[in-house]
Amino acid sequence: GMVPSGLSSTAMTRVVCAWLQNDLRVHDSVVLVRAAEAAHLLQAPVLPVFVFDPRHFGRTRHGRLKMGPFRARFLLQSVLALKRRLRELGSDLLIHIGHPEKVLPPLLKSGSLLLTQTEVTSEERDADRRVEAALEAGSSLERCWGSTLYHRDDLPFDEALTDMPDVFTHFKNLVEPEVACRANEVPTTYHDQPKLETGMKVRPCLPVPGEGSLPLPPPGFASFDFEPTWEDLPFSTGVNQSSLENRGVLEFVGGEDVGLARLHHCVAKDSVISTYVATRNHMLGADASTKLAPWMALGCVSPRRVFEEVRCYERNVMANASTYWFTFSLMARDFFRFQAAKHGTAVFREGGLLGKAPTWRGGDREFQLWADGRTGFPLVDANMRELQATGWMSNRDRQNVASFLALDLGVDWRRGADWFERWLIDYDVCSNWCNWVSAADLGNGRVMRFNVLRQSMMYDPEGDYLRHWLPELRGVPGSKVQEPWTLTESEREVYAVKSYPQPCLDPTISRRAQGSHVREVATCAKRHLMEVTRARVSVSSRPFRVSADCAKKINGKEGGRSDRTAVPSPPVTPSSASPTILMCFFLTLVGDDPGQRTTLVHFTGIARAG
């Protein structure tokens, strides 16, 4: 921990401070690699710091806690794990509790350098700016890009991202083939890394800083003894430390070592990676999906490290649909981060990216039923109870419950986003708020309105997940648990369905409103595809025409807005459109109903084969 004797006496007055925030790791850490490089150039010691900011433990605009017990405990574990890891490298972590603009400047004498990872959202950027404004003259703050799979400088968009698409598929199609590996502002050690064999345009992971490359300030400069406990966390009101329920899918423990162990488990032969496509929407089971999100949200695991492990699996075992979906998920995470950077505070405003909010039908009562898991719709209720009990919910179910709150109950979507911010153990500001904007149909993409009953029947046909989280329905056999409102009085008696509430919306009206025009459009498109298949007519010679009746259904006001329609004019002729384009076209036709969308993918496959 001593400073090398070669450091000059003037160097003792200045430091390179590595302010770690959502990058709690030593692997692929641009801040630490840059700190090691700056320490060598300036002949100055390195001071790694983490600050527990009371603002993060305060309350939201709706008066709710910003950080609930699961995320707080996971954060505390991750910070202490980072301290241990830095000690192994001959460094340490100075931990403070307080406002960064008051804590950090006194540590930075004139000539010092403060390094931190670039943040893109308003509150986080405000924190950076407050610190920068409070620094002594002669000291400077340098922001390093390090939270995404693709580096910001490598994207094929302008600096302000104004030409970046707001639809994920369009973003993905531009980024996948075009991002080139450029070495802008990357530490010199970057060039020593082996290039990936696959030709994918993702920069290689940065190395773990060498032992001794992060020399500490001299003894007495700062005390590294403080290791906070739960009681030290700066909650505005007392919060009990919850223990995860034993009904949770996985016990989440914070820290880089545990996160990397989980990653290695996921990419082991015959593990999550081999079945991910088939199981990622399953609601029960520790290995149904990767569950890496909590570690990625705090930067305990780098997205580039995940990418490299997946590539390694593809080289040594096999490449399949599941390995692609791993990478697809990383790209989606990038998309939300860059979307938040592009739109700034719009992702937190009531009107979202569209700027104009609807009139919210639902109020406090509807929100509370949703939050407490008492809506009378089993899929929604089971998920909301799992969230409060464990801090976890599957990705598909987040979309289900968000759609239900904003589009079915008509409650201001920001209340739901706030609730997720409090309870999710893997809360990520960009992914959370951008997903909620989309769920409320206030983004620039196509609305994804979910029919929660149909989703439940698709992904939990026997109701095992529902019975797991809804003890009131534990006695209801088979698929009857999906629609408890259809049980007769005698059945309710026999199955001991005592206290489960009646649905807060009429489920028959809800189902009809959510899907009728979509089903008719789907039938229309299917019929055309079947004609192509039955006639054995070459796809390249048969014109494809959407009937006027179908076009009315799609362009009608029953569900979508006219600017979202996919009806071409003049009609598409396959001579000018490949089968792949037709497939995308049909996916868009199907619109809001994921169940029907799956069906059409299969039909399109038949048409192409024919």
Image (tube, rainbow, N blue to C red):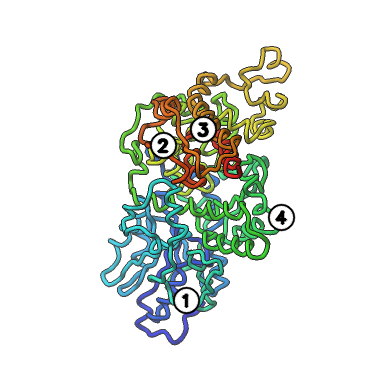
Outermost residue to the left: 137
Question: Where residue 131 sits in the image (x, y, percent)?
Answer: 33, 60
Tell me the number on the disc at residue 270: 4
The CA distance from mark 1 to mark 2 is 52 Å
Local crowd size for mark 1, using a 10 Å CA cut-off: few (<14), some (14–19), many (≥20): few
Classify 351 as above or below 200: above
What residue lies at 44% left-to-right and 64% top-to-bottom?
49
Q: Amino acid at mark 4?
A: Asp
Which mark's residue is nearer the viewer, 4 or 2? 2
Location of the C terminus by quadrant is: top right
Viewer-side residue, 85 vs 458: 458
- Mark before the other along the chain sequence, 1 or 4: 1
Write down the residue under mark 2.
Answer: 571
Can residue 385 be seen here? no
The CA distance from mark 4 to mark 3 is 38 Å
The CA distance from mark 3 to mark 1 is 52 Å
Question: Where residue 294 sits in the image (x, y, percent)?
Answer: 55, 51
Local crowd size for mark 4, using a 10 Å CA cut-off: few (<14), some (14–19), many (≥20): few
Classify 306 as above or below 357: below
Write down the residue under mark 1.
Answer: 191
Question: Dividing the picture into quarters, in which one does residue 249 lie?
Answer: top right
Left or right, residue 523 beside residue 116: right
Write down the residue under mark 3.
Answer: 525
Classify 548 as above or below 309: above
- Mark before the other along the chain sequence, 1 or 2: 1
- Mark before the other along the chain sequence, 4 or 2: 4
Q: Amino acid at mark 1?
A: His
